[in-house]
Amino acid sequence: ALIPDAQFPFTTQDVLLSDDYDIAIVRFAGTPFQRAGLIPIPINAAPLEDALAGNLMNSTVEVAGYGQTYHEGEQGRYFAAVKLDLITPQFLMVNGQHEQGVCRGDSGGPLLAAGVNGEVNVFGVVSNGDRCCVGVDQLVRVDIEADNLVRYAGAYAPSMSEYPSACWGV
């Protein structure tokens, strides 16, 4: 089916659902993302442990969604700066601290932060959020499905190098 709000309409080839996690891979027919000005954001394939987890914990990360907002009558694509509170074996928990966050309709939206190469990477996708759009939200970690995301969907993952702990990879 066509995605109605897309700037460049395209069709889906298939949707692959994970058996274990709240994550899906959508493959598109043709090459819809090979257009001028579109640059893919790499996924984080490095396990969220050690220095990487230490640098991310309690830091401000960006989440994005396309749906309802905290502000009455507004909707659309938004980014929010939230605090990464918890890393579990399957999830990332972020806290909007009563100021901002993800809302209804944002499922599948990315959590963006500095990756092992110091550049912006996708670390998780929105799975479940706070009803008020400014509380605690749950995101599925992409590193636990990274092999499938790369193999089946052609996702780009940077090389696995040591994460520099002193300067956030900058």
Image: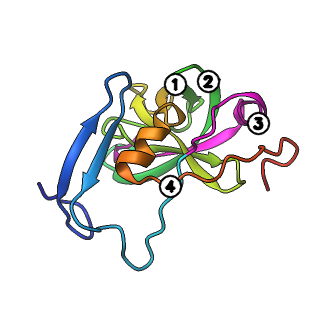
Whether the magenta-drawn stretch holds residue 57 is answered as yes
SS at badge 2:
strand
Q: Are marks 1 and 2 in contact (CB under 8 Å)?
A: yes
**Is the residue marked by circle 4 packed among few (<14), some (14-19), or many (20+) residues within 10 Å?**
some
Mark sitting on residue 144: none
Report which residue position mark 2 lands on. 87
Kind of residue sitting beneath label 2: Ile
Give the CA separation, mark 3 to mark 4: 22 Å
* In front: label 3 or label 4: 4
Give the CA separation, mark 3 to mark 1: 17 Å
Q: Is residue 97 left or right of residue 129?
A: right
Q: Position of residue 160 (x, y in %)?
A: 67, 46
Q: Position of residue 110 (x, y in %)?
A: 47, 44
Report which residue position mark 3 lands on. 55
Q: State which tag comes first along the sequence, 2 or 3.
A: 3
The answer to whether residue 137 is above or below residue 60 is: above
The answer to whether residue 17 is above or below residue 39 is: above
* Residue drawn at point x = 78 percent, y = 51 percent: 169
Report which residue position mark 4 lands on. 156
* In front: label 4 or label 1: 4
The answer to whether residue 67 is above or below residue 104 is: below
Q: Residue furthest left?
A: 1
Report which residue position mark 1 lands on. 91
Kind of residue sitting beneath label 3: Asn
SS at badge 4:
loop
